[in-house]
């Protein structure tokens, strides 16, 4: 089983498998998945930290730089917006503790070692996906110059507090590729394809065509011995002739 780190909670995803025999791809096998998880997850490409304890991420802000100008002889001012800067930032606090499987609970009294590992993870300089159980998700970097702790009282839960700043669109394949969450530039996170490496570029192009036609599905038909590509039951052409550059929203991931 392969864990997907880039999906959000309470969301529907379509996953597709393409069977391959020799150099011929078969019909898509598509399955729809609804996601649901509890608590807060902060992930990198291949690892994550999570907690369900006293999570507070509600001090979120939308940043859009503006200036108010009050010219002489005008009753009302001008509000000027410069550039296209538009991003979110916020403050996050939560209790991080290791789960004790023998006590079937979180050991919040002896969690200082676990908090140190959490701090090292937060401050490793790698962009993060911050995901919460209600479906909110951000592609962000930790922007605090320090990580605070809310309490030093012995045996009481200690909250770790830090700031984060959005650095990209968590639903954009280009941004996920840029920050090394996926392997394919412009990829989307709603398909998983089983296919050999040497066939990937052609399949990428098929997905591009599907995007261009705004079709709901992509089907390979064996018409008169020639494998045809069609979308919404309308033939597009012989796959041998489909040798144009790729580069739009395409499939993300392969499985062995």
Image (cartoon, rainbow, N blue to C red):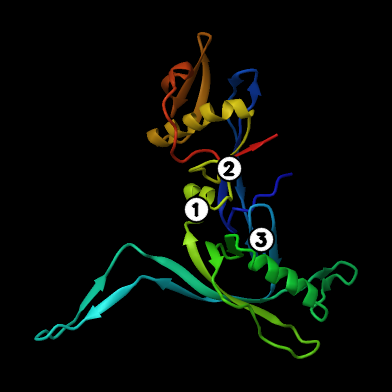
For the residues labelled 3 and 2, say whether their Cβ atoms are less than 8 Å apart: no
* Callout 2 secondary element: loop
Residue 168 is situated, as x and y percent measured from the top left of the image, at: 47, 58
221 vs 113, left or right, is left
Residue for point 49% across, 53% down? 171
- Residue highlighted by disc 2: 183
Query: Nearer the observer, disc 3 or disc 2?
Result: 2
**Disc 3 from disc 2: Cα separation:** 25 Å
Q: Is residue 137 visible?
A: no
Residue 166 is situated, as x and y percent measured from the top left of the image, at: 49, 65
Q: Is residue 195 above or below residue 224?
A: below
First in sequence: mark 3 or mark 2?
A: 3
Residue for point 74% across, 44% down? 1
Query: Nearer the observer, disc 1 or disc 3?
Result: 1
**Disc 2 from disc 1: Cα separation:** 15 Å
**119 and 192: which one is in front?**
119
First in sequence: mark 2 or mark 1?
A: 1
- Residue highlighted by disc 1: 171
Can you tell which mark lies on residue 37? Answer: 3
134 vs 83, left or right, is right
**Disc 1 from disc 3: Cα separation:** 18 Å
49 vs 241, left or right, is right
Query: Nearer the observer, disc 2 or disc 1?
Result: 2
Task: Please identify the residue farthest to the right as the structure is shown.
Answer: 102
Can you tell which mark lies on residue 46? Answer: none
Quadrant housing residue 198: top right
Residue 229 is situated, as x and y percent measured from the top left of the image, at: 47, 22
């Amino acid at each position: 089983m392969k864990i997907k780190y880039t999906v959000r909670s309470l969301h529907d995803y379509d996953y597709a498998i393409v069977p391959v025999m020799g150099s011929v791809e078969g019909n898509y096998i598509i399955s729809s998945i609804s996601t649901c998880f509890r608590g807060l997850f902060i992930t990198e490409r291949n690892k994550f930290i999570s907690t369900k304890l006293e999570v507070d991420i509600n001090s979120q802000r939308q940043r859009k730089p503006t200036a108010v100008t009050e010219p002489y002889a005008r009753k009302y001012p001008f509000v000027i917006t410069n550039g296209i800067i538009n991003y979110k930032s916020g403050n996050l606090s939560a209790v991080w503790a290791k789960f004790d499987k023998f006590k079937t609970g979180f050991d919040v009294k002896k969690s200082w070692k676990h908090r140190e590992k959490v701090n090292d993870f937060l401050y490793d300089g790698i962009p993060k996906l911050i995901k919460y159980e209600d479906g909110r998700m951000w592609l962000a970097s930790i922007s605090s110059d320090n990580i605070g702790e809310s309490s030093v009282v012995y045996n009481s839960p200690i909250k770790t507090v830090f700031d984060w700043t959005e650095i990209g669109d968590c639903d954009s394949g280009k941004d996920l590729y840029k920050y090394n969450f996926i392997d394919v530039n412009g990829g989307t996170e709603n398909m998983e394809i089983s296919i050999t490496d040497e066939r990937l570029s052609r399949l990428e192009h098929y997905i591009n065509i599907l995007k261009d036609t705004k079709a709901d599905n992509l089907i390979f038909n064996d018409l008169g011995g020639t494998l045809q590509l069609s979308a919404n039951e309308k033939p597009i052409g012989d796959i041998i002739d489909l040798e144009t550059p790729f580069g739009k929203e395409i499939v993300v991931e392969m499985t062995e």
